[in-house]
Structures are given as C-alpha cells and as structure tokens.
C-alpha cells in the first residue's frame, strides 16, 4: 500500500509519528488534503484538526493551534506550538480557557491586548470545534 510518513510535533513533544494514507488539515486558504507523492510544499496552517487516515483505515485526530506544514513526497511534518491528540482534548479545560479568553477580550485595554485576546479566542473556538468533531467520529 502507498503511504506517507506523518510527524506532528509541538513545542513540548512529538504528538504523532507514523504511516498514513491521507492527511487533511486547515491550511491558511482552506482545507488541505495530502496524499503520498504530494508536490513539496511549505505553508502556514490555521487552528483546527489534523485528520490522519492510517494505513489500517483507522483515523487519528490532532488539534493544532496553528503552525507550519512541510510536505515532501514521502513525508508530512506539522510543527505547532500547541498540539493535542483528539483523545486528550478536555471539554472542561477548553471551555474554561474559552471563557478566560472572552473575559480578556472584554477587558482589553489596548490594540495589542485586543489582538492577543482575539487570537486566543479563535484558538479555543477551533479546539472546541475539533473536540466536537472527534467525539462524533467515535
């Protein structure tokens, strides 16, 4: 079977490393689908879910808070400050962080505070959406 090696790495650790038939992830200009022998590519990715279709047909989900994607014909590498396996996403923590980001948005005193709060809120909203999507697949 034709596969491509996939690595998803956060600032702290390697989150996923393995062979896949297909990878889908949130590119800056929309959803990207990567198959083996894909043309080389480097691009930014937005907060959201990386869906990895494994060689055996199972699917693995990893939430990323944005980052960089590098594609080579035989390898996909996703680099993100924050990456969390779908099975490790936590409803309570995600909702608490979203509420904190909403609070920061209300209390923003400057353009910088406002931009930071908006960014954090976007990341948390994407994480909650990824969590819902992962739960539906199970």
Image (spheres, rainbow, N blue to C red):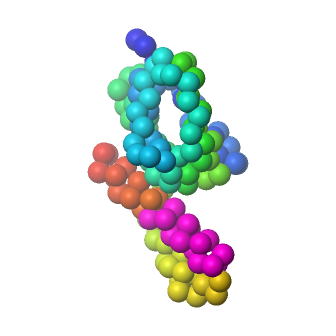
As drawn, which residue projects farthest toward the left? 136
Along the line of sight, which residue is nearer the eye, 39 or 35? 39
Task: Kindly identify the residue that appears in the image at 51 percent across and 62 percent down.
Answer: 123
Answer yes or no: is residue 40 visible: yes
Q: Is residue 75 left or right of residue 95?
A: right
Residue 13 within the magenta-colored segment of the rendering: no
- Could you say where residue 102 lies in the image, as x and y percent from the top left? 50, 79
**Taking 70 as reference, is 31 left or right?**
left
Q: How many marks?
A: 0
- Looking at this view, name the residue that lies furthest to the right: 12
- Prevailing secondary structure class for the magenta stretch in the rendered image: helix
Image quadrant in which you'd find residue 129:
bottom left
Q: Position of residue 22 (x, y in %)?
A: 41, 28
Residue positioned 50% across, 51% down in the render: 46
Q: Position of residue 133 (x, y in %)?
A: 34, 52
Res 87 seen here? no
Residue 75 in the figure: left or right of residue 129: right
Where 92 falls versus 1 (above or below)?
A: below
Residue under the point 54% across and 75% down: 101
Q: Which quadrant, please, contains the N terminus?
A: top left
Q: Which residues are magenta?
A: 111-125
The location of residue 18, given as percent across then percent down, is 54, 27
Up-down relation of residue 116 to residue 62 (above or below): below
Residue visible at 50% across and 22% down? 39
Magenta-colored stretch includes residue 113: yes
């Amino acid at each position: 079977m034709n596969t491509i090696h996939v690595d998803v790495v956060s600032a702290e650790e390697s989150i996923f490393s393995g062979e896949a038939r297909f990878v889908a992830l949130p590119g800056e200009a929309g959803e990207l689908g990567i198959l083996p022998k894909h043309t080389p590519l480097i691009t930014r990715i937005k907060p959201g879910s990386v869906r990895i279709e494994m060689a055996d047909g199972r699917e693995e989900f990893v939430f990323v808070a944005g980052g960089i994607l590098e594609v080579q014909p035989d390898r996909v590498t996703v680099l993100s400050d924050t990456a969390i396996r779908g099975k490790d996403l936590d409803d309570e923590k995600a909702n608490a962080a979203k509420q904190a980001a909403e609070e920061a948005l209300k209390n923003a005193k400057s353009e910088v505070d406002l931009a930071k709060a908006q960014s954090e809120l976007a990341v948390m909203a994407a994480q909650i959406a990824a969590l819902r999507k992962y739960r539906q697949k199970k």
